Image: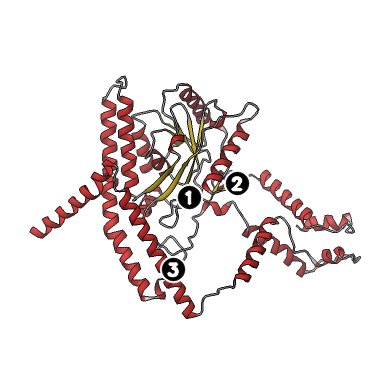
Amino acid sequence: MFPRIFILTYWLSTFVFGFLVPAFLGGTLTLRRWYIKNVHRLFVYCDDIINERKHLLGFDNELTEEEISSEEEEETMRRSSRGKRRHLPSYVEDARNGEESNPHFAFCDIAPLLMNGISTIRDDQVTTRFYAQENGLWNMLTRTSIHPVFMSHRLNVIWFLSLIWRWGWLLPMRILVFMAALGWLLLATLILVLLPRSLPWYDKCYEWMICLVFKLVTHSFSAVVKFHNPENKAKNGGICVANHTSPLDAAVLSYDNCYSMIGQRHGGFLGFAQKVLDQTTEHIWFERGESKDRQMVVNRLTQHCTTGKNLPVLIFPEGTCINNTSVMMFKKGCFEIDTTIYPVAIKYDTLFTEAFWNSSEQSFVKYLFMMLTSWALVCDVYYLPPTRRLPNENAIAFANRVKSLIARKGGLVDLQWDGMIKRKKLSERIRQTLMDLERQHFLESSALPRNISHGNLSTLTSVL
């Protein structure tokens, strides 16, 4: 009986004084940074073991500096001229060399066209953004294609100890902290509902209580968040726009500031959190497919921003989660409103966890469990200088300008594609238009010789 009481007391005291109290007081940041630094050293040590074993087994394909530089040069040239198709059928090559020939299609003439198609699929810059990216180092998690556990007994021991650490120690503590965050959210909501909003200190009380909820949430993932240029934080009456990787983006940003949120209405656990948050201040939740909801969002957003006393609005204009390697098209709705826009770039370190939420393959609860069993949530938040729409600038151009600023600051790829294509099938009209454009682009970029007749060119076009 006594050992059980002793173990229970030990766990509770560790949880309260090691996790909960420092989270309430805003401490443990130095300890978490020290923890992240040592975990990174462990990754590097394991990578050295992997390279050593590969060398002993003869699996290393180390190149000389000249070969590496030539390969990088070739890759750069290939990417800079990705629209150029170097593989052409034999009759096109003959015509390019000035040889008159009557083209006769053979089975082998299909091969260059297939190579061009495969190259286009391989160089796809859109669909790869909807899946988790791979890491260069083995981080001992199952969310990576690198599994060198059986290369060395040392790796076996390290992997087993890491499993005990994450699942046997971190996971129970993190679950308790996360449950404490939910309990504090319910208690804070009850207190704020009972308090009259006419009190002069109501806003300060709300900001302190809600920010503390999100601090506890981020602490449950051992978050290490570095905020850059905090003087550019969103002010009341403004709109904060950021790139979107997961619903935890809102928790990370709310760790440092208090917002009114706009987003898609969800079900399950996430929908429950939205309903609770909606009891204390004005948030806007909508159904993406309802046209009436779109107009309602624009009207409420305009009304919210006309009053300078309201909390800043947090919006993710991409409308969907991207894997934190790029920024896709921003919806123009919030950029039509005449108010100050506060851009924010969020960049996660995928070495310690994969923060991207693939909502089409996993539920939010499963995603939370994956995050709770990871090493830590490490990210940088860059507050960019506030900006407004220029006199001769329309909403689309303004959205693209803000998107470019976020992509440049966060080291992300700036793409013009709409991220919603992962949820919707393209219509037949759009598919046909894209096929026509790709066919035309192939013919123009292949530098076809002039002595090919119009009839032969039509024949080639029909084959493509």
Q: Secondary structure at mark 3?
A: helix
Give the foreground label among 3 and 1.
3
Q: Is residue 38 visible?
A: yes
* Drawn side of residue 52 relative to residue 456, left or right: left
Q: From the image, tell me which residue sits under label 1.
A: 360
Mark 2 vs 1, N-terminal side: 1
Q: Residue at x 49, y 46 (%)?
A: 321
Coloration of the structure image: secondary structure
Q: Residue furthest top?
A: 198
Task: Work out how far the residue at label 2 is from the one at label 1, CA to CA, in angstroms.
Answer: 21 Å
- The image shows residue 114 at horizontal and vertical percentages of 70, 63
Neighbours of disc 2 within 10 Å: few (<14), some (14-19), many (20+): some
Q: Are the residues flagged by discs 2 and 1 in contact, CB closer than 8 Å?
A: no
In the image, what residue occupies the spot 31% across and 19% down? 198
Q: Is residue 31 above or below residue 68?
A: above
**Which element carries disc 1, helix, strand or loop?**
loop
Q: Is residue 246 left or right of residue 318?
A: left
* Residue at mark 3 to residue at mark 1: CA–CA distance: 32 Å
Residue type at mark 2 is Leu
Residue 245 locus on image (x, y percent): 47, 47
Numbered-mark total: 3
Q: Nearer the viewer, residue 280 or 78?
A: 78
The amino acid type, in three-letter code, at marker 1 is Ser
Query: Residue placed at 39% from the left, 60% from the top?
Result: 40
Quick check: can you spot residue 373? Answer: no
Q: Which residue is mark 2?
A: 415
| Quarter of the image where the N terminus is located | bottom left
Sort mark 3 into few (<14), some (14-19) or many (20+) by Cα contacts within 10 Å: some
* Quadrant showing the C terminus: bottom right
The residue pinned by badge 3 equals 47
Q: CA distance from mark 3 to mark 2?
A: 33 Å
